Image (cartoon, rainbow, N blue to C red):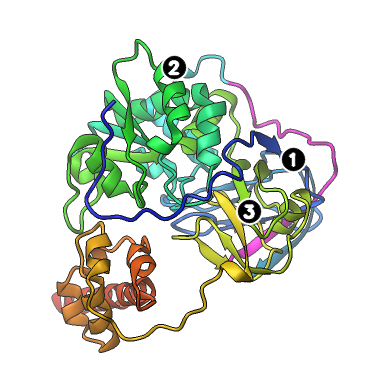
Amino acid sequence: MKKRTFVGGIHPPGNKVATVNKKIVAAEPPNNVFIPLIQHIGAPCHALVGVGDTVRVGQKIGDASAFVSAPVHASISGTVRSIVDIPGFGKCVEIENDGKNTLDPSIVHNPNPDSLTLDQLRQAVRNAGIVGMGGAAFPAHVKFNPLKDKPIEFLILNGSECEPYLTADHRVMLEYPDRILAGMKYIMKMLNCSKGYIGIEDNKMDAVEVMVELLLGTEEIQVVPLKAKYPQGSEKHLIYTCTGRVVPSGGLPMDVGVVVSNVSTAVAVADAVEKGMPLIERVVTVSGNGVKRPANYRVKIGTLISSLVEQSGGYNGRVGKIISGGPMMGRTLYSDKVPITKGTSGVLFLPNKEIANELPHSCVRCAKCVDACPMFLEPTTLYKNSDKEKWDTVERNNVLDCIECGSCSYVCPAKIPLTQYIRQAKEIVRSRQKSQAAKEAAAAKG
């Protein structure tokens, strides 16, 4: 098979060997879970339960009336002990486990899922609270409801998992390939598209082989082997490598007739449509040299990270940084007493000796950041103009096209935190644009 790639990008060490061959195991049921009421892009949920209420597995405990939102459900059965605010996660419903694992009566198997209409499929996805599980956490029912004037031709499932350390999606492809395929077909039906691709990097050839064998005789879905390179999992680059289409500056995948979803999201869709099961657990990679026994766990949403540390043998020496997600685009956590969410693909524990503490110095104009940028931007130019608060210039230099992949910061010999400067600049430019739009709207009314 010919392996496809894109221009730019970097090749950081994979560091996947610790968990790549570790089968998914069920994490031990926690004594308490803390389920955030906001685990998605869009409107936050309001609590549907109160302190003292008894809840069951899969029961809806939070919802919102907004279209761009997703409900949240109880991942265990038990008693609501509190609704507590956890910094960085917002309001969380604390449930004490009763150990009975009692299923909510609303969860019913569908004996004939193929008979569901497009609207019924989307409603099933919405009711299940499914969001993008690759990290973006965009409500899936919204993505799977395309605009009438922008028909979708291709669905691409993202199995690249290009972030170092993470192997959750890799294991899902090896262990649940039939569930991926089932969910993919439901998504294609919702999108009314007839062609699908599954993009998988060539450092996962075992997954490629499994999916190819499963798809024998299936013409509408094709596996696309990709050269292992970061950030291959980016939507725009996955679209280019699989279809050759280029998403325009400021555009969305739907502008070129494509929707991109994650392989784990497809599994969640299959479970929702066929079993009526909401998104109450996910596969999470626990890795890094700061933990004794790295593993791939199937984890109840709301489980505290400290519980996974305990199941992994505890800390291996002094940990200098805990990261939710991968080291390139993940976010640093202030504590292990925070919950796993629908978007948590991995948790990394890095010892102090592996954390770079070099201070930045002046740009040496080597252009390594320019060569590495997969969006064909000039990170050093954006950084310098941001530092001088030249926001009009920053905007003209297409700062909003930055996908914040961190490639520029990774290759910079001056150790300048380019990505952080650009992220801040994007926020300011967006704020200025909103302010300008509001002024123009007010002027039009007056």
Quadrant hosting residue 277: top right
Instruction: Report if residue 107 lies within the magenta region.
Output: yes
* Up-down relation of residue 228 to residue 66 (above or below): above
Residue under numbered circle 3:
340
Q: Amino acid at mark 2?
A: Leu
Sequence order check, earlier mark of 1 and 3: 1
Q: Nearer the viewer, mark 1 or mark 3?
A: 3
Relative to residue 354, is residue 265 depicted above or below? above
Q: Quadrant of residue 47?
A: bottom right
Looking at the rendered image, the disc whose residue lies closer to the viewer, 1 or 2, is: 2
Q: Is residue 366 above or below residue 264?
A: below
From the image, tell me which residue sits under label 1: 56
Q: Are marks 1 and 3 in contact (CB under 8 Å)?
A: no
Query: Residue at 20% across / 58% down in the picture?
Result: 250
In screen coordinates, is 18 left or right of 312?
left
Real-space Cα separation, disc 3 to disc 2, in angstroms: 31 Å
Give the magenta range: 88-109
Mark 3 or 2, closer to the camera: 2
User: Position of 245 compared to 383: left or right?
Assistant: left
Image position of 26 with respect to 33: above or below: above
Kindly identify the amino acid type of the residue bearing the numbered disc 1: Arg
- Which of the image's four quarters has the C terminus? bottom left
Residue topped by disc 2:
214
**Label 3 residue SS:** loop
Q: Which mark is residue 342?
A: none
Distance between the Cα atoms at labels 1 and 3? 19 Å
